[in-house]
Amino acid sequence: MGSGVPSDAELRKAFLRILTKGSKSNTYKFALARALLEHCRKQADYGSDPSIRDHVPYDYLAESFVKYYWHQESLFRIKQSFSTKSMPHAVQIIQERFGNDPAKLFKDVDRKAREAAEESMMKRVFGNENNGTSQVVPRFQNIRGLSKEEAGVFYTHSDKEKMIHLKDGISKFLSSHYDVLLKAVLVEWTRYLEKINTMPKLISKLENANARRGSLNKYRTMFRDSTHCFYCRTRLERHHINVDHFIPWSYMFDDDPWNLVLSCQNCNLRKSDSLVQPEFTECLIERNHGYYDRLREMRKSLDLLDTGKGWPTEIRHNYDGCKESGFVVKHL
């Protein structure tokens, strides 16, 4: 990288090298990259002057980390580190502040809990209570193999001011190339997570922070010959029939028929976003065998599920993967 202002090609190379070559004990570098991109895009959209555009407060980063990690931990329980002994502080904070029964959308999160989480994120991730320096901000550009110029190409920072100061031209570069660079962040973040997690559709879960479940009403009609609750076998009452994701939606992230069963209201409420005891997996496989030749949508969903080992094996694999990801097993 030569003297003067680096070219877009040089900046792009340095940014991608940070994402792909740096050592990582967790996903903080990806989260910081995303936060910087979103800050610069937002300021460009607002037409902010340089006094705002080129300065990124730590409290903005703390708010962003709460949003990113709430979505991944509370909704999907995605592991963010290889360590089995201790979780990253960001994940610990989400668990401490939001517990096991979160809101369905971030905008519905309790305001006091969110503010408390942001305060904790400032202290433990961006202030680091132990030694008074941010864990992630200095390390973001500290990549083995980068020259001294490249290692500091994007910003300087001040823990005293609690501020990142973007260098000349960086805000424009990040906002101008926002779409391409954000896609790179999400792809590399997903690649990292795939080494730790076995769950399906990781990149979709990263991209869709405000994902909503689709309507399941049509499945009441599709499975109309199921007259008893899948779990407790009590007879289903007409106006109290629930359609349940056998393996939780927050793990599978779809509404495929093979994973849907009819249940009574009581079992649906008790199960919530959990698994049931493993013997029900064999009941589901038997149920799906019965529908395979009779329901075109069921056959299609099972054929898509099959990766060569047979769809019953894939159902068992998804159940085990969900359990391994930390989903609770409730005995109904």
Image (cartoon, rainbow, N blue to C red):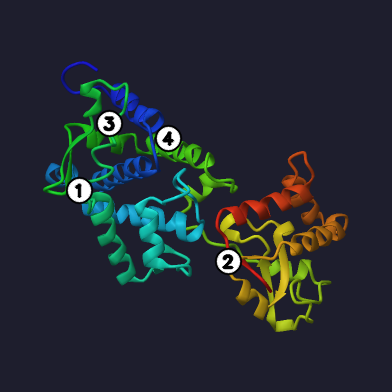
Measuring from the top left, give residue 226's x and y in whole percent: 81, 72
Q: Residues within 10 Å of mark 2 (few under 14, many from 20)?
A: many
Q: Which amino acid does label 3 sit on?
A: Asn
Query: Vertical placement of 267 versus 158: above or below?
Result: below
Disc with the residue nearer the chain's start (1 vs 3): 1
Q: Which amino acid does label 4 sit on?
A: Ala
Query: Vertical placement of 58 versus 7: above or below?
Result: below
Q: Residue 142 carries which label?
A: 3
Left or right placement of residue 331 versus residue 1 in this view: right
Q: Spatial distance from mark 4 to mark 3, Cα to Cα? A: 19 Å
- Determine whether label 1 and label 3 are within 8 Å by CB: no
Q: In which quarter of the image is the N terminus?
A: top left
Q: Spatial distance from mark 1 to mark 4, Cα to Cα? A: 32 Å
Q: Name the residue under label 2.
A: 273
Q: Spatial distance from mark 1 to mark 2, Cα to Cα? A: 39 Å
Q: Residue 184 carries which label?
A: 4
Left or right placement of residue 124 versus residue 162 in this view: right
Q: Identify which residue is drawn at 74% across, 72% down.
A: 231
Q: Mark 1 points at which residue?
A: 131
Q: Identify which residue is drawn at 65% across, 80% down.
A: 266
Disc with the residue nearer the chain's start (1 vs 2): 1
- Determine whether label 1 and label 2 are within 8 Å by CB: no
Q: Nearer the viewer, mark 4 or mark 2?
A: 2
Residue 182 appears in which quarter of the rendering? top left
